[in-house]
Image: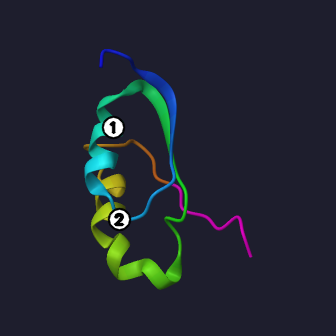
Amino acid sequence: PDEIFDMIFIDTRKNIEILKTAEKKLTKNGWLLQHNASDIHMAREMKQFLEFVRDEKHFSHSILFDVDI
């Protein structure tokens, strides 16, 4: 429970609670990577998640890009 990480990879969709827990476990300049965050078919379901990560109170930067075609 006391561990902190430089990088956390999340492979789940829509789970804002996992995101909030991960944020607390990151070092100051840590990276949080989220798989499937840019899936256009999940836009409505991802709205709350994307608003959270784009809020500078939680993360200093947010980058959204597609890797898979």
Tell which tag, 1 or 2, sits nearer the viewer: 2
Residue beneath disc 2: 14
Q: Main secondary structure of the magenta part?
A: loop
| Apparent side of residue 56 relative to residue 69 in the rendered image (left or right) | left
Q: Residue at x 32, y 72 (%)?
A: 47
Location of residue 68 (image quadrant): bottom right
Q: Secondary structure at mark 1?
A: helix
Q: Amino acid at mark 2?
A: Lys
In the rendered image, which quarter contains the N terminus?
A: top left
Location of residue 26 (image quadrant): top left
Place of residue 14 in the rendered image (x, y in percent of width and height, measured from the top left): 35, 65
| Apparent side of residue 27 relative to residue 21 in the rendered image (left or right) | right
The answer to if 59 sits in the magenta stretch is no
Q: Residue at x 36, y 53 (%)?
A: 53
In this orientation, which residue lies closer to the viewer: 15 or 6? 15
Q: Amino acid at mark 1?
A: Glu
Above or below, 53 against 29 in this view is: below
Above or below, 67 against 39 in this view is: above
Q: For mark 2, does the 10 Å Cα neighbourhood hold few (<14), some (14 to 19), or many (20 or more) residues?
A: some
Q: Residue at x 55, y 57 (%)?
A: 35
Residue beneath disc 1: 23
